[in-house]
Amino acid sequence: GILSQIGVGQVRTQRKALSDVAVVSRRLAPYSLDYMGMTTEQPWEDAALQSKAEEKLRYVQEFIRSFEEALKNDSPQDRTWLRDVCSPKERCFPTLLRILVEPKYQGFIRLCCVTLRACQIILRVAAQFCAGRAGDHNVGRDLLVHLGGQDLAQGAFREVHRLAKRPEPNIACNALLLLGELGPEALPARRAPLLLQIVSELPDRTDDFVEVPLRFHAWGGEHRRALLAEIVEHPGGQLLCEVLLQVVNRGDPARRLRAVKVLAGCLALPGSERLLYTNDARVLVEMLLRELPNSAGDEHAFVCYAECLRAVATRCEGARLHRLDEARETLGGLAEDRRLTEGVRAASSEVSRAIGAQCLET
């Protein structure tokens, strides 16, 4: 049956490790299988079809639990099982895609939601097994075809795009999370308003959903410009920035830097003066002052943190004088430290002058 196809009952006995899987587990927020208070599905006239859909729902839920448990445990056996599930030899992924594209199941909202989620987490983890594709934004798109087959992948691709525009926000949210795994061609720049709409409609899911805006920004070009403009203009922009602050405070170094880049980009735009609440702007200054000395050995990261400090100190009036003396002292010391690269010293001097000049104007 579908349970064995999905692989829940596989024995996890091999011991081949994958170091990046532990990082993925920290980035995948646990998925609440009981959030279905979003909508109450009405009884269907076809009782046999409804029973079959509910059976599949339970199996997919069990798969997600098993998958997330393996990510959490992160043992060699769990990593091997994850690798097996993400292999084209397994029928797990095609089975899930068939549920998505099967017309008779498209009215079952809960089944659709959990199936989208299951596909997303498989693609997220499968990407970690692709040697030599780190930083490749299109690896998820290629995996969709590799694991599902060309025809099934194309059908699923069309269906996920349709679901991303559904009025039911939880379906749209899960569809956008899946499209985010597929790369910039799957989620074009014109979809930026959809991202902020989801943030506004589902604030409780923003901790998980924030990965989509982070990827959108990382794709650069028109994606980045569209996202930054939408954050500044959309009412959901403030909430998204609150979550980005949490990423800066608690995320791993790479993700923290991605969040800082988004915040700096937003604050560099006209009209962003009230994007951060006063207290949030001050907290951001404090976090940046903490990170500047810590990142001084990495010129790229340091310049990103310094530019964000410049942006928040010059754009947000409530942060302009906050910890000003500490900021000047920190930047001044870094500017004079001959052990650091010329780029770090120059950025320190430039930002120090910028925030000082802004304060004189206040």
Image (spheres, grey):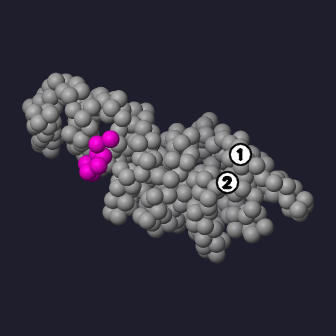
Q: Amino acid at mark 1?
A: Met
Q: Are marks 1 and 2 in contact (CB under 8 Å)?
A: yes
> Looking at the image, which is closer to me, 277 or 337?
277
Q: Which residues are magenta?
A: 267-274
Instruction: Give SS at disc 2.
Output: helix
Please identify the quadrant where the N terminus is shown.
bottom right
| Circle 2 Cα neighbour tier, 10 Å, few/some/many (<14 / 14–19 / ≥20) | many
Q: Residue at x 58, y 63 (%)?
A: 165
> Looking at the image, which is closer to me, 355 or 300?
355
Q: Disc 2 marks which residue?
A: 113
Q: Residue at x 16, y 24 (%)?
A: 325
Q: Is residue 322 above or below residue 179?
A: above
Query: What mark, if any, has residue 36 been given in the picture?
Result: 1
Decide whether the magenta segment is chiefly helix, strand or loop: loop
Where does the image place residue 81, in percent across and percent down from the top left? 66, 47
Task: Report whether residue 197 is seen.
Answer: yes
Q: Amino acid at mark 2?
A: Cys
